[in-house]
Amino acid sequence: MLAKRIIPCLDVKEGRTVKGINFEGLTDVGDPVELGAFYAAAGADELVYLDISASRQGRSTFTELVSRVADRLNIPFTVGGGISSLDDASRLLDAGADKISINTAAVNNPELISRIAARYGSQFVVVAIDARSDGADRWHITTHGGSRSTDLELFDWAKRVEQLGAGEILFTSMDHDGTRSGYPCALYHRLCSSLSIPVIASGGAGSVNDIADVLTLGNADAALAASIFHYGEISIADLKRQLADRGIPVRI
């Protein structure tokens, strides 16, 4: 059985790691290169860096940051945020990122998935999916950070994304994100069972139990989290030890 992955997520604004709620009340939580190196040494399997800067200066800073991260880290890392073209993806991959993540751009231009995969390979393409339940067991895809609803349905879109060449899906349930009350494991299990590519679970992590559940009951291939690591609520080493004690395959 393949080892389950633990992936810290770092939001970056103009070269610094920040944390907030809905991108408001942002607090500086450290240098992204140093923090990434710390997580790598602590046992993280991969990292995700998300550029939340909207300005051109922010984009330039982020590309430079990716180069510095690539020089420092010895584990894979994914970058995302504002990638809307093949040129955007190429710039970040050429700077040293191992994978890129696209969300809104994939919905607006699905062929972008195929174009990036054709140039670099499917293993370089992560499609992030944010979805919200309509209360009737139908999950609608959202874009622009969850602020805009679409007519796309979760399972149909995930399957299409796979067919277009995505190598991995990063799925967030908008109904659970930020609640720290756990993941919708039945939903993750259904999604993972319908696909042949890995699924990363994001949003809802508040405890070791939550992460253990989504990796077992939900059958997710990886769990992504931010606050519980940034604020030292649990170390990656402790998390992995507790997961291993439960018989969950992780890299120690």
Image (cartoon, helix red, strand yellow):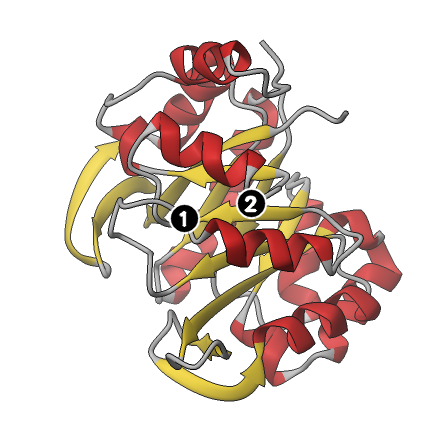
The quarter of the picture where the N terminus appears is top right
Q: What is the distance, in whole Å, between disc 2 and disc 1 at their CAs?
A: 8 Å
Give the image quarter of residue 237: top left
Instruction: Count every numbered label the image shows and give the total.
Output: 2
Q: Is residue 51 left or right of residue 176?
A: right
Look at 60% across and 79% down and name the residue there.
Answer: 107
The amino acid sitting under disc 1 is Tyr
The quarter of the picture where the C terminus appears is top right
Q: Are marks 2 and 1 in contact (CB under 8 Å)?
A: yes
The residue that disc 1 covers is 183
Q: Name above or below for residue 187 compared with residue 130.
A: above
Residue 20 is marked as: none
Give the image quarter of residue 218: top right
Look at 48% across and 76% down and name the residue there.
Answer: 137
- Asked whether 112 or 196 is in front, the reply is 196
- Asked whether 70 or 181 is in front, the reply is 181
Q: Name above or below for residue 88 compared with residue 106.
A: above
| Mark 1: secondary structure | loop
The percent coordinates of residue 79 (x first, y second) are: 55, 48
The residue that disc 2 covers is 218
Look at 33% across and 78% down and name the residue there.
Answer: 147
